[in-house]
Amino acid sequence: MKKFTLFTPGPAEVPPRVLKVMSEPIIHHRSQDFREIFFEVREKLKKLFKTKQDVIVFASSGTGAMEAAVVNFFSKGDKALVINGGKFGERWSNICKAYGLEVEEIVVPWGEAVDPEDVRKALEKDGKIKGVFIQACETSTGVEHPVRDVAKVVREKKGDDALFVVDGITGVAVFDINMDGWDIDILLTGSQKALMLPPGLAMISASERAMKFMEKSDLPKFYFSIKKEMKSQKEGETAWTPAISLIKGLRESLRMIIDEEGLENVFERHKRLASILRGMVEGLGLRIYAKRPAAGLTTIEIDNAEEKRKKMRELGAWVAGGQDKLKGKIIRIAHMGYYTEGDMIYVGNVLKYVVQNSGK
Amino acid sequence: MKKFTLFTPGPAEVPPRVLKVMSEPIIHHRSQDFREIFFEVREKLKKLFKTKQDVIVFASSGTGAMEAAVVNFFSKGDKALVINGGKFGERWSNICKAYGLEVEEIVVPWGEAVDPEDVRKALEKDGKIKGVFIQACETSTGVEHPVRDVAKVVREKKGDDALFVVDGITGVAVFDINMDGWDIDILLTGSQKALMLPPGLAMISASERAMKFMEKSDLPKFYFSIKKEMKSQKEGETAWTPAISLIKGLRESLRMIIDEEGLENVFERHKRLASILRGMVEGLGLRIYAKRPAAGLTTIEIDNAEEKRKKMRELGAWVAGGQDKLKGKIIRIAHMGYYTEGDMIYVGNVLKYVVQNSGK
């Protein structure tokens, strides 16, 4: 029997009703039928991002939207300040470098959050920085960066001369990220986390300030051209063939999040789930790895992590291990999206069972 | 009641058993469970492309793979010869230009196929051409280009000095395209045509010759980096999070095509379907628009095409209209993938009913 519950930080669990709409017959995308779905999705995505701007949908993984955040707004030789506190911070640097940006990094020790004062110092030291790149949550370590405080620093020091770019892949729909309210320039996310969908969709939105950068950007782009997509998506279509079944699923999950549970209630639930699970973890004498843990996942320091992860998987709780230098040192348990308090009691007790029945 | 059958040239019908596997609970992609699925997909994709090379899967629409075909193998300033006989030929030019290639076009009148001798002349006239770009089937007109003959010309004139790049989005799994046998350098396709899946996946393969071009390519790339994907996909993983549900669906549809019906039988069926439908169309006194019609779709010249398309849609036969300058002048009926002889009798008679009951 292969029964399991996914507690991996992407993909995460997909509700049966979302799976169901994705198994309905496919419709054609240049049609009123599709436009009705897509207009509803667009309206709800604005509420999700807390923005008046368009939220653009790509058929890609979240990394595609990260690339879009670079190639649409910057130019060759532009200076980027990347907050690198893990595998996904690294990815910002790699994308920027692939497109010829000059990268300055604030290297944050894994497991820690960036100090906004370090961002201030970096911006004071180098006046030419055009973009500041961060993760709302660094999924490899489970840390939440102080996005709101960093946003303030960027605006104070740079005004309209730099963009603040936030990877919200494990942040949007997990905890509060207020794009317009906090003056974030570019916010993006992916489908397979708190949006409770399979992977294959990414979403991105850009401020008025970013739109001005877009006019000057000289980096090549085609598939991820936001200008092309904006023109089409305002009309309820997409520039290229959209991932129709996933967009139908997205409408369903946005109805659950925005209309039924309510976004603020979703945030509160994630906090409760994190608190329940972390209480259990600490009760076992284990340490939370992240110094400033995000609400979407719990990272746990544990001996023989790979062995314990495998045992948990055998018992039905599919959790993730550590990546790169954290491999074998931590396990990561996701609780963003389709999870209840009961799920936390389940996964916490599977962890307890494995710890108590382990050789070490 | 909203009953319909899709006869649009992408997306096309998806078999219920494929929809069903895509509605199963999502699994994590860094796991043995996923690797088993993906290795099976990889083996079957080689058979589908008729190649010994790796076939790489992207989470994107087919246009993403077209971009990958440019950015991974060419360099800024390279000369491209594009065979432009419709909307998708145009797209090759647009992608090449977006990345700084110099584009020479063979403009083929819409509705016609390219003459391989014109390719020969173009290659003789300009010795610097590094890539020849074509569609196996130009979906906007329903024309099949003579890919095999053009491949011969390219190799005769250019040897190892140029790549022959084939967009097989409405060709692969529709009619014979023999990548290794015909010495095609780059072949690509998308999920939402004869592969009987929703949109959201693209596949691409490259010859040994193309791999040498890849080493010298200086165009920027990240999400669509074939080098990165090759490294991961050989291990049964993907560089970025894959569209897991669509890949599960792909395994199912490849089992149907490769193992159950057999690829050559699929090709024969498409020919029969085209023949049945075209017989009915001509029996109505209507003309086939494409001078060299591809087996995957039938394009029909018809007065008041938009009105007739809408009436057919109301009756349950969801066909497509013309694009750009063909809007209002043709309808397009797809029969690639999940279609039977009975479906042709159905759609042909809906067309007959609409024609005979139309004001004009």
Image (cartoon, coloured by chain):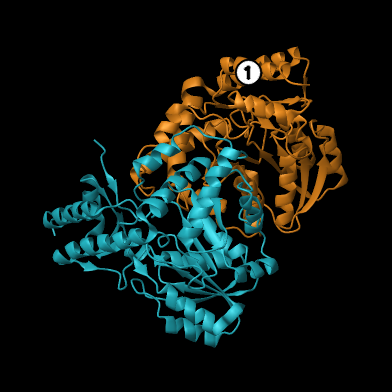
Chain colours: A orange, B cyan
Is B105 left or right of A306, judged from the image as shown? left
What chain does badge 1 belong to? Answer: A
Q: Residues within 10 Å of mark 1 (few under 14, many from 20)?
A: many
Q: Position of residue A260 (x, y in %)?
A: 47, 21
Q: Which quadrant of the view contains residue A88?
A: top right
Q: Amino acid at mark 1?
A: Leu
Residue B97, compared with residue A135, is above or below; it is below
Q: Position of residue B42 (x, y in %)?
A: 53, 53
Q: How many marks?
A: 1
Residue drawn at (25%, 40%) of the image: B3
Q: Nearer the viewer, residue B306 or B29?
A: B29
Q: Is residue B75 visible?
A: no
- Say what secondary structure mark 1 lies in: helix
Q: Position of residue B114 (x, y in %)?
A: 40, 77
Q: Nearer the viewer, residue A313 or B165?
A: A313
Residue drawn at (50%, 66%) of the image: B92
Q: Is residue A238 visible?
A: yes
Residue drawn at (48%, 71%) of the image: B181
Residue B157, compared with residue A174, is above or below; it is below
Name the residue beneath numbered marker 1.
Answer: A273
Residue drawn at (81%, 51%) of the image: A128
Q: Nearer the viewer, residue B351 or A72?
A: B351
Q: Nearer the viewer, residue A161 or A75?
A: A75
Position of the C terminus of chain A by quadrant = top right
